Image (spheres, coloured by chain):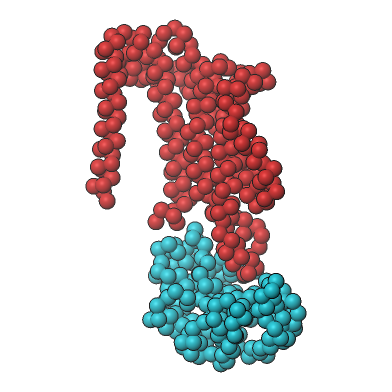
Chain colours: A red, B cyan
Amino acid sequence: MKRFINKQTGYGALSVLLMIALWKMASIHYGSDFILPSPEKTLATTFRLLGDVAFLSVAGSTVLRGLAGFAIAMVLGIGLGIPAGMSQGFRAFMTPFLVVIRSIPVVAFILIALIWFSSDDVPVFIALLTMFPLICTNVIEGIKNVDHNLIEMAEFYHVGRGRIIREVYIPAIAPFLFSGASNAMGIGWRAIIVGEVLSQPRYGIGTVMHSAQTFLNIDVLIAWTLIAVLISYIFEQIIRGFEHILIKWRTK
Amino acid sequence: MKSVEHLYKSYGPLVLFKDLTMAFEDGRITTILGPSGCGKTTLLNIIGGIETPDSGILTGFDDCRFSYIFQEPRLLPWKSVRGNIEFVVNRALTPAQRHDKVEELMNRVDLSAFADYYPSQLSGGMRQRVSIARSFAVSSDVILMDEPLNGLDSALKRTIISWFKQLWSSDPRTVIYVTHDEDEARLLGSSRVVKLKSSL
């Protein structure tokens, strides 16, 4: 088992090394920092940015927007997903909303949101719109998959309604909720940054990426990209960590 | 004595029960024997009050509390053995009383060593033992058993029945046991065996 994991990690590392090697070769081929800076120069820039005083305000603003959008999407997704999962009528009512939100291009939302909201709130709104349908759909699927026999058993034994929701429904939808949350986070970060590029809030990863592109600081642009990937990865790991703790009955 | 009298039940053209009358001795095991499709589960559901008969009289079941042992153990996958039994215990008891009750029952079915195991980590026979222990965790008057040994091999059937009888003899309740297997009826030592004919 241990050996197997090591082998997997080895292949993962190999693929990262290959990407860096291709990057290095391309940067040598173009020979210009304005087109593609070398990996080592970009890495140096990344560390410089990480140590910069403005780093926390820039990355922090983006993270806070992401968390705000995620929190609202979770509340709405669970709050609407549970009744939609339990009632066919409400599900039929919700489906068009979910389909419409999912199929509208993100950019269309951003362009409209730019008119409606302040530049700080546009990315939050975009995050919310991209995350909500994913979470809601997963909650609905989760409720639909609750084993009816278990509900019947609990009712036979006169277990109260509140406890049935807390101890049967919620644990049953937890795996679905986690997979929805993890998908939502993955897509959400990208949407937030696109929103920031277009809405240009004072602080934000999208804002600094846009200005780096304008001034042809390609190393800065790629460095922020790496930071965005890192943030996305960290949150993915946090969700996985929670999942591991809360759904231990499944992994054992 | 509890009984069902002149029971009628049909689903569309399918007549399950036509003037069915049957008595159950209090504190004894009554086995209802019949082939699949003869309406055994429906009869249990009618007795348990989950389904209503077209007509008929049920006597002695009015203020009854029921326990069920289902064909599948129906355990919550996210709760341990202890948690699954505790789930049904009356909330009017204090947490300490509930704890004692659960520990005692796990002891009785010899699952104390597995108290923190999840159902996915148990064998089929062990899961059904948890389900049996759970049925004794509530203060029910009647235990309804719907082919709980289906799909288990005969050696396992024998051991599970002996676990059940051990629990039952220390805490006898009226048991209504449905099965299609005559061996089970005999092993269980039923005080009565009633045969239902296939309506198909």
B43 w.r.t. A227: above or below: below
Q: Which residue occupies 50% across, 32% down?
A: A187
Toward which corner of the image does residue A196 lie, by quadrant? top right
The image position of residue A224, as x and y in percent, is: 42, 20
Q: Quadrant of the C terminus of chain A?
A: bottom left
Residue A138 seen from this side: yes
B81 w.r.t. A42: above or below: below
Q: Which residue occupies 53% across, 49% down?
A: A174
Q: How many marks?
A: 0
Relative to A140, A21 lies left or right = left
Instruction: In this rendered view, identify the residue nearer to me: B118 or A198.
Output: A198
Toward which corner of the image does residue B158 lie, by quadrant? bottom left
The image position of residue B108, as x and y in percent, is: 46, 78
Residue B159 seen from this side: no
Q: Which residue occupies 59% across, 55% down?
A: A169
The image position of residue A84, as x and y in percent, is: 65, 47
Relative to B18, B38 lies left or right = left
Q: Which residue occupies 42% across, 38% down?
A: A237
The image position of residue B160, as x and y in percent, is: 44, 80
Instruction: Residue lying at the far bottom in this picture: please name it.
Output: B191
Relative to A212, A3 lies left or right = left
Relative to A10, B107 lies left or right = right
Instruction: In this rendered view, identify the residue nearer to me: B116 or B174.
Output: B174
A51 w.r.t. A32: above or below: below
